[in-house]
Amino acid sequence: MSVVPDSRSEWFCALTMLTPSIVALVVFSNKRFEFDNVYEYVVFVQCFVHAPFSITLHLKRAFGDHCYRDGGLIIRRLDYTFIHVVSSLLCFGLSHSVLYGTLGTLLNVYCVYKIWTFDGLFQTPPIHNVGTCVFVYLFGLVINERPCAFVYSCVVAIMFYLCILFDNYALMHLLCGVLQYVLMTQRV
């Protein structure tokens, strides 16, 4: 593409990607969250899994690389891939169901396959695939009988989508912190 990424915006995107991890650590350190089982641990740890890849992508873009070729493309694909890895983790963690988590993982594996086999010139964010996977992992809250958390999370997810439409990834990253808080504290 001919448009150079705005370096200040990309630096801010990299910085705001730390929000979910900071929220998770604050909630945990304030004893508002205890690991009653492995599923809750997965909800806590998932935000740390994706952050390095997203931060790396935004920093690379801050230095003027569009990340459409060579090493930059690999970083872009790793960012997209780990969104799906986290989606798989959240399918397990939010549903408390191995069966549901496995089904969600199969969907995410298919999406990752599509990311790595794409051979077009410009690989854009797979918004529709990610949106589908987000809904699937959020639906795990319904399976786990947490309807209020599901509704709150869906409102945040709609706000994510609006951020993407208006190309405001920094705000979306901040909203990921809100979502992390809801997922870790909303028990009903």
Image: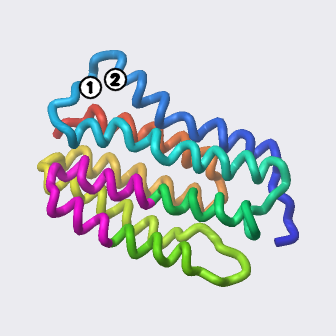
Left or right: residue 184 versus residue 85 is left
Please tell me whether residue 110 belongs to the stretch shown in magenta: no
Where is residue 173 shown, x and y percent of the image?
Answer: 55, 44
Please tell me whether residue 91 belongs to the stretch shown in magenta: yes
Is residue 3 or residue 64 the one in the foreground?
A: 64
Quarter location, residue 142: bottom left
Q: Hey, what amino acid is under mark 1?
A: Phe
Quarter location, residue 55: top right
Q: Hey, what amino acid is under mark 2?
A: Phe
Q: Which mark is residue 28?
A: 2
Residue 119, above or below 6: below
Residue 113, above or below 9: below
Asked if the residues shown at circle 2 and circle 1 are in contact, with their CB atoms under 8 angstroms apart, the answer is: yes
Q: Which mark is residue 184?
A: none
Q: Residues within 10 Å of mark 1 (few under 14, many from 20)?
A: some
Where is residue 21 shown, x and y percent of the image?
Answer: 47, 33
Helix, strand or loop at mark 1: loop
State the residue at coordinates (30%, 58%). 137
State the residue at coordinates (43%, 61%). 84
Left or right: residue 10 versus residue 138 is right
State the residue at coordinates (27%, 56%). 91
State the residue at coordinates (25%, 47%). 93
Q: Which residue is mark 1?
A: 33
Q: Main secondary structure of the magenta part?
A: helix
Left or right: residue 83 versus residue 97 is right
Where is residue 22 shown, x and y percent of the image?
Answer: 49, 28
